[in-house]
Image (cartoon, rainbow, N blue to C red):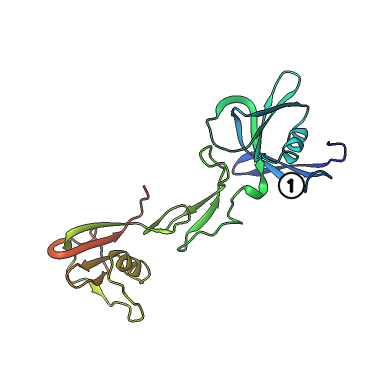
Amino acid sequence: MIQHLHVALLFVCNFSNLMLSISLKSQSFSSETFRVVIWNKTQNSAWTNTVVSDVACVAVCGSTKQCVAVNIVPRKESLECKILSNLGGDFIEHPGAKLLVAEKDIKTCATVTCENNATCQDIRPEVKDLLKAFSCVCPCGYCGVYCEKLNYWSQRGVAIAEHNIPFPSYVQFDGSTDACIEICLNTPGCKSADFSTKDSTCLLNDVNRDMEELSSFKGFIYLEPSCICD
């Protein structure tokens, strides 16, 4: 099965950890690259083979339809090649073991887009999400995997008085707290907003509760972008 296999082993430094990429070309399956995403952990598998090299294990995966990853575990005189059909389940510690997944399935900063002016950083995948090799660093006011969700603190019955800044004339307001805080996030100098529940208006402020004490205002909701994601 692997006599026509042409192999290139590439060792690269990434995420401050040594990572192994195995590039395979074979008559039995298309060109593919596998990357080690975690070390020293193993998982139970439905299919287990005994092989003599990492390349042989990846070759078995390449010819197995259900294979999404391989878990290679060193034994005394050989390697245990575990063929994984999914990345769920618990992993246990095992010195020298490594898990490889197809390079094309790993999400990195080169293949994803962080939203709302977030910064993307390549990271080492975690066990809870082995295909996620990126992290979107969200600006204040946004959260989520891609920084796609609004994130703000609110309190009813209070507001900031006499610190309003002009509401952008080009913006159409739909009368919701989400829309109000989003307008604040996109308006230079805006640090908070007061939303009127009576007439659904949005007042933008150039200060926040750290700079100015909140005052009691019936019918208002105070809104402030949060920098802390849960």
Vertical comparison of 40 with 61: above or below: above
Image spot of residue 197 (x, y percent):
19, 67
Which residue is the site of mark 1?
32
Q: How many marks?
A: 1
Of the 4 image quadrants, the one containing the N terminus is top right
Vertical comparison of 6 with 74: above or below: below
Q: Secondary structure at mark 1?
A: strand
Extreme residue in the bottom direction: 169
Residue closer to the observer: 36 or 173: 173
The answer to which image quadrant residue 41 occupies is: top right
- At x 84%, y 45%, the residue is 27
Query: Mark 1 belongs to which amino acid?
Result: Glu
Q: Give neighbour class at mark 1: few <14, some 14-19, many 20+ (Cα, 10 Å).
A: some
The answer to which image quadrant residue 109 occupies is: bottom right
- At x 53%, y 33%, the residue is 89
Image spot of residue 168 (x, y percent):
33, 78
Q: Horizontal placement of 206 versus 149: left or right?
A: left
Image spot of residue 116 (x, y percent):
45, 63
- At x 57%, y 43%, the residue is 124
Extreme residue in the front direction: 65
Q: Horizontal placement of 19 versus 142: left or right?
A: right
